[in-house]
Every structure is written in structure tokens, then in C-alpha cells.
Image (cartoon, rainbow, N blue to C red):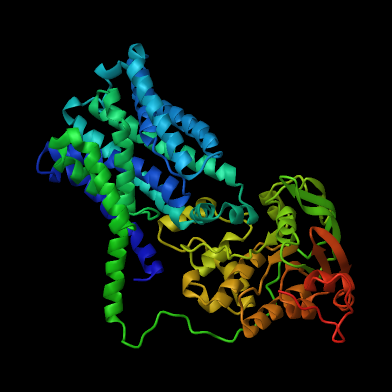
Amino acid sequence: MSVQNSRRLAPVGWLLAIILVAAWPSLAPNPFFVHLGQTFAYTAIAVIGLNILLGLSGQMSLGQAGFYAIGAYGSAITATSFGWPIWLSMPFGLLVAGLMGVLLGLVALRTRGLYLAMATLAFGFIVEIWAQRAVDLTGGTMGLFGVPQLDFGDFRNVATYTFWVCAAALILVQLGSDWVFSSSSGRRLRAIKESESFAQTVGLNVPLWRTAVFAASAVLAGLAGVLFAHQSGFVSSDAFSIRLSIALLIAAVIGGLGDTRGPLLGTAILVAIAEVIAGFHTIGLIIYGGILLAVLLLVPEGAVGMLRAAVKLVRRADLPATASEAPVPQALTPRPPPPGTRRGGSLEVVGLSKAYAGVVALRDVSFSVAPATIHALIGPNGAGKSTLINCVAGLYRADSGSVRLGDHEVASLSAHQRARLGLARSFQNLQLISGLTVIENVMLGLPRLAGEGGVRAVMRWLAGLPHEEAERARAIAVLDALAIAHLADRTPGELPYGHRKLVELARALAQDPSVMLLDEPVAGLNPLEAQQIAIALRRLRDSGKTILLVEHNMEFVMDLSDRITVLDHGVVIADDTPSVVQADKRVIAAYLGADDIEAPESGKVTGP
């Protein structure tokens, strides 16, 4: 089934889900299954939050039980001790959980990986200890009794009403999750997960995004805690131990991280496991740990990954024996780029210096790039080229000097701010997001235009209709300009290396830049592929784009460039036209290692 067909069937699926939720209290064999449905619903909400946090943005949290507890206590305490109505106490619980998520998200900006996991684990322990010690407020280990339940004035139907509220909340949260996964927000979070440096160069404020997704995950964990508190009518610190955090993590991993359906499947498996091992509570953590280890080793993509693999096997069995999924290599003839809103601008670097622990990488570097030209930056290995490009792009902060992009002084701006002003770059090591298709990678670079997205896009998405037609059309136009539009629905891993280079160039072009920084655009390519890149760059220049490229292929540089700047040991030793630079004795000496050497008759510089 195609993606478009599955989107058209989505509203039918949601309608069936609503019907099932409405009828479940009547269909359930006994009240226990209604209670199980409640537990499944609010647990799945917390797992969805963790899936977005870890599966999309790559931030590990072992402290979700802490947010769960804060939401539960925030609502339970205000409802019991202060007499607040439920409609007011529940939002308060979410607010407190969200605020704590923002605070911990700010802490998370300073840590990564294992250190972040340990920081969040410590947070969970702190909340648990606070719940135990603040007896006057929380009841400690004895618990907080008399938490109002969701009876809506009819205590006889409290189980039904609670189930409906929990299930309705799950449907809304799942809808939100599906929207995130299918929209630009999901693409941006995947980009942040795979490469924060790359994400900054396409204009993403990475600290803001990381903090926001941490806060959103905290709110969803807090919502689960709020629903738990008003379902049970009793809140005890024993319910919010590390065991809960591990259980939520297991559900996310078992279901399949980074997949919008994973939390539902993972939570169903978790609830089933919890019922099976209920009699072995003394070794519960050992059992949970064993399950998590087994999943990570045996089925790292989770249950959703297993189902996806099974579907692929069935589809493959239906294909002809000669069918192949590999793209057919084609001779590319790049065409003029689509009309943009931004013409090529100038780039001026004055007195730029950068040192690492006393080692000078750049010393008083100055040069300028004229609009609508191709300017090459060359030099032997270790000359400082990559450091210079990163300082210009804003990934490194120079110790001194000025960088002007058109009329803007950008030396003090961050990488994402420079990107928004029209500075785009490619990387020596390809920075394509493996989990996205070619067209989705290109769409990452598209600047958002007024009128795109918003309520109309959400409503079309809810109706199962295409909701990103304008963005896809713009991305296809960029791909077509490089003659690779036929690869739009492939993933980068399915493409030859030369085509991947073109995809990254397309992504940079999609940013509609005034200046493009290209780091070794033909490294690793064969002569034919390099020629195709050269054709594309010439046409970009002729259309008005400004290009600064770093490259070791001297033949490529000399044939393509309008002007060349040569670095050696962080110092500019030449800055002129190709014909002048290739005959410069200092340049020849830098490449060949001679102090005094005559220029060869051919006048060509050879280098790595």
C-alpha cells in the first residue's frame, strides 16, 4: 500500500478507534478489562512522550517517573488539600510537570548520552525521595487518600467515565504524535538527533528545539500521572520508583523507537508482561532489565520493525524475480535552478584568527568573495581550510576578526542565525538524514514561507489529504534542477555516492542561499560524477548564486573557479585568479614541500 493510500485510510482508522473506545465498557467481559483499558491509555501517553524525546530527538531520559509523579501530586494535592475542582487541578499538574521539563531540558543542553541518562535518573530519585519525605504534603509512603475521581456526579459509572477520559486523551495525544512524525517538526527532530551541527546549518535553533521537546515529553508524562491519580483515588510514593521509568523505556524500545505506532504496541506488550509477572514483584527489576537487554540485542527495531520486515518479505514475494530495488544509474544533465527569491551576495572575511589550546589554526585571514562567483579555498592538509569554513558558518567561534555576509556582520551570530540570513553549507562527510527520503532531506532546507502550515494543513492532514503540497513542489523543483527528481522517494542509503553528493547540494540549494559553502563537493567521486557536479555549480553561478568551495581536486578547482585563496598553516599565501595562483612559487612550495622551486611549464599545481 502506498503512503498516500495509507493516509487516505487514516480517518477511517481513527473513526473505528473512537467507536471502539465508546463501546469498550459494554464489550469488556468484566470490569477488570475496563480498568486494564484505563491503565493502557495513560501509560501509552507517557510512552508516546518518551518515544518523541528519545526516538525522534535522541535525548535519553531515565527520569520520566519524576514527571509522572509531579503531574500526579500537582493535581492530587491541589484537589484534596486545597479543594480545587478537577478541571482546574488537572491542568495545574500538567503546568508543574511542564515547568520542571523546561528546567531539566535546560540542564540537558549541557549533557549528552550517558551523562544525560544519569542526570535524569538523579532527577527521578530526587522526586521520589521528596515524595517520601514531604509527609505533610504528599502523605509519604502512606500515600494521599481521597483524590477525587472522574465520576461526573455519577459514582456508579466512575470506571466507564475514567476510561473514556483516558482513552480520549490517548487519541488526542496519538493524533498529535502522528502529526509530529509526518510534518516538518518530525524531520527537524530527526535532523537534530543525527547531527546537531547539520541541524544548525539549516537554520534550526537546536537548544530551543531540544528544550521544547523535553518539556513536551514531561507534559505527557505528567498527563499520565494526573490520569493515574484520579483513576486510583490514591497516590503513594511507591508508585513512582525507578521501576516505572524503566517500564516506560522498555515499552518504547519494545514497540519500536522512532515509529509513531511503536508506543501503542509497546504499551500493550508491557501491560501484558506486567500482568504475567505480577506475582514476582521482588525480582521485577531483574525481569524488566532482562527483557530490555533481549530486545536491544535481538530485535533493536522493536515489534514495529519486525512487522515492517514481515510486510516487506510478503511484498518481495509478490515481485517478479528480476525486480530490483536499486536505483538505475543515469547520466545526469543538471538544468538551471528554479527561480529563487534571493540573489547571490558577497562574503567578506577580515582578520579572522582561531587557536586551539595555543595551537594557531588561523592567523589574520582575510579575503572576499564577489557575488555570483565561484571562489575556491585550497591548501595542503592541515592548512586550516575546514576550521575557516566552520568559523564562517558559525559552527566554531573565531577568536577575533570579522565576517560579513552582504550587509550583515555575522561574526557574533550563531550558526542557525547565519543560515537564516542566507548562508548554506555542505559537509565533507555527507550529512543526510538516513531515516528520511531524498525529498524529505531536501525539504529540511526549505525556508518556511508565510501562509504555509497552520490550521489548514492540519485539517487536510486529519482528512487524509496531502498537507505539504507546496513544500514538496518546491523540493521537487530543486531536485529537478539537478536532474535527480526521479530519486525523490528513495532513501540516501539506496543511492550511489555521487547521487548522494547531489542530494546534499540540493538540500543546500533549497535554503535559497545568498552564499553556499561547499566542503569538498567532489571528494570520492569518479571523473564523470565530478563533471556532473561541475556542470551543476557553473549553472548555479550563472543563475546568480555565490559559491565558496573547499576542494583538493586541483583540476576541478582550476577549471571551475573565478578566484582562488590559498591557505598554508593558517595563513593566506595567495589570493588571485587561477592562472596566477597556479604559477605562484609559494603555492607550489606549500604543496610540494620545497622552499625554492621553479614553476613547471604546464603551470599546474598538483596536490592531494
Q: Is residue 145 visible?
A: no
Residue at x 39% of width, y 83% of height: 324
Quadrant including the C terminus:
bottom right
Residue at x 55% of width, y 66% of height: 472
| Between 577 and 256, the one nearer to me in the picture | 577
Q: State the residue lying farthest toward the front.
A: 595
- Number of numbered tags placed on the structure image: 0
| Between 489 and 538, the one nearer to me in the picture | 538
Q: Name the side, left or right, on which 323 lies relative to 429.
A: left
Residue at x 49% of width, y 33% of height: 104
Q: Is residue 67 visible?
A: yes
Quadrant including the N terminus:
bottom left
Q: Quadrant of residue 317?
A: bottom left
Percent x, y of residue 58:
46, 49
Percent x, y of residue 411:
78, 48
Residue at x 82% of width, y 81% of height: 604
Position of 483 relative to 186 (above/below): below
Position of 15 relative to 241 (above/below): below
| Between 191 and 603, the one nearer to me in the picture | 603
Percent x, y of residue 159:
19, 33
Q: Name the side, left or right, on which 333 lies relative to 185.
A: right
Q: Name the side, left or right, on which 477 lies relative to 265.
A: right
Percent x, y of residue 218:
43, 36
Position of 476 relative to 131 (above/below): below
| Between 92 and 385, the one nearer to me in the picture | 385
Q: State the residue lying farthest toward the top.
A: 136
